[in-house]
Amino acid sequence: MDIQNQIFSEILAANNIVVTAHKGPDGDAIGSALAMFHFLNAVSKSVSVCLPDDVAHNLKCLNGTDQILLFDKNTATVKEKLSQADLIFCMDYNAPDRLGSEMAIELQHSKARKILIDHHPNPKEFCDVMYSDITCCSTAQLVYELIEKSNNKELLNKDICEAIYLGIVTDTGSFRFPSVTFRTHEIVSELIKHGLKHHIVHEQVFDTNSIDKLKLRGYAIADKLEIIAGLPVGLITLSKAELMRFNYQNGDTDGLVNTILSIAGIEVACLMMEKNDGVKISFRSKGNYFVNDLASKNFNGGGHKYAAGGIFYGSLDEASLVLKKTINEYFLI
Ligand code: 5GP
Ligand code: MN
């Protein structure tokens, strides 16, 4: 039996399903999770979506968003859901700690069968069924493959299609990354045939900026962008005080690191933001430089070759020093 049909038979056998996705959910996390939610509803299963924390406001455009349970706000309810579930989906993450340490413990303690659907490299073996395809552009595309290959295409409805599209469009930089294939476009054409209004999703995600968000980005580029001497590396650091000055909301810096990478000649882009629990680091790269190694070796993180991230337990200045030192070592090799 192929993996998609194996997953579908697990679904048919389950009564209480929980769908999870990673902390700081991006468009693919929320899109793949809600696509599963709507698909499971379409096969009449009892299902809850439980996320570690909230999504950015521009990603709250999908039906079902208002039913999501957040671990940081509804901790007791999420704990109960995870312990009572007989099947848990792990969407768009490759290791339990991507849920945050506390929710990861609850996941691991649950007796439920666990199914991973993900496209990140180096998945940890923490699920009973691992549908991991690191060549795929997005987890949302894998949800589509699950639906089609388990002969459930007739169940595709507007809610499922919009959720899959949100995941694909955000994880492919609007269809520009090398991970996009003919299959991605074929799938989007199916989504449109089944009721997707792609421009509505696109507008909601990309054209609903606040003025504060644009001002923060303007400030970051005008005053904080640093090109590391002699290297094709651009860095922006933002302290808590700077973020507060612009009334920072989750998602306000999404894509800022890609703006650094859009500079001609820049091959590695890095954004560092001071948070309560450490410095959150985002990397993007192009060409021959793979940033997942840099993130895992120096910043407690990981990710894809061209998009990676991590967390640094220290000050913003120390984080940027570590980057300058390790990046130098790399370029000297
Ligand atoms: P972003 O820069 O958009 O937050 O993250 C880009 C990618 O880097 C994510 O899709 C994920 O694969 C990876 N990533 C970001 N933060 C972390 C982290 O703290 N740990 C790990 N393992 N990967 C991360
Ligand atoms: Mn993804």
Image (spheres, rainbow, N blue to C red):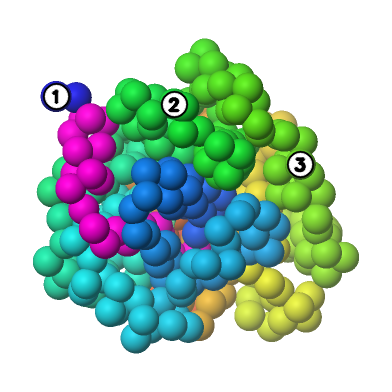
| Pick the front one: 265 or 126 | 126
Q: Residue at x 71, y 74 (%)?
A: 248
Asked if residue 11 lies in the magenta stretch, the reply is yes
**Chain-order first, disc 1 or disc 3:** 1
Q: Report if residue 319 is visible in the image.
A: no
Amino acid on which the number 3 mark rests in the picture: Ile
**Chain-order first, disc 3 or disc 2:** 2
Quadrant where the N terminus sits is top left
In the image, residue 48 above or below residue 146? below
Q: Position of residue 228 (x, y in %)?
A: 61, 50
Residue under circle 3? 200
For discs 3 and 2, the disc positioned in front in the rendered view = 2
| Pick the front one: 294 or 149 | 149
For the residues labelled 3 and 2, say whether their Cβ atoms are less than 8 Å apart: no
Q: Residues within 10 Å of mark 3 (few under 14, many from 20)?
A: few
Quadrant where the C terminus sits is top left
In the image, residue 250 above or below residue 22? below
* Element marked by disc 1: loop
Asked if residue 41 lies in the magenta stretch, the reply is no
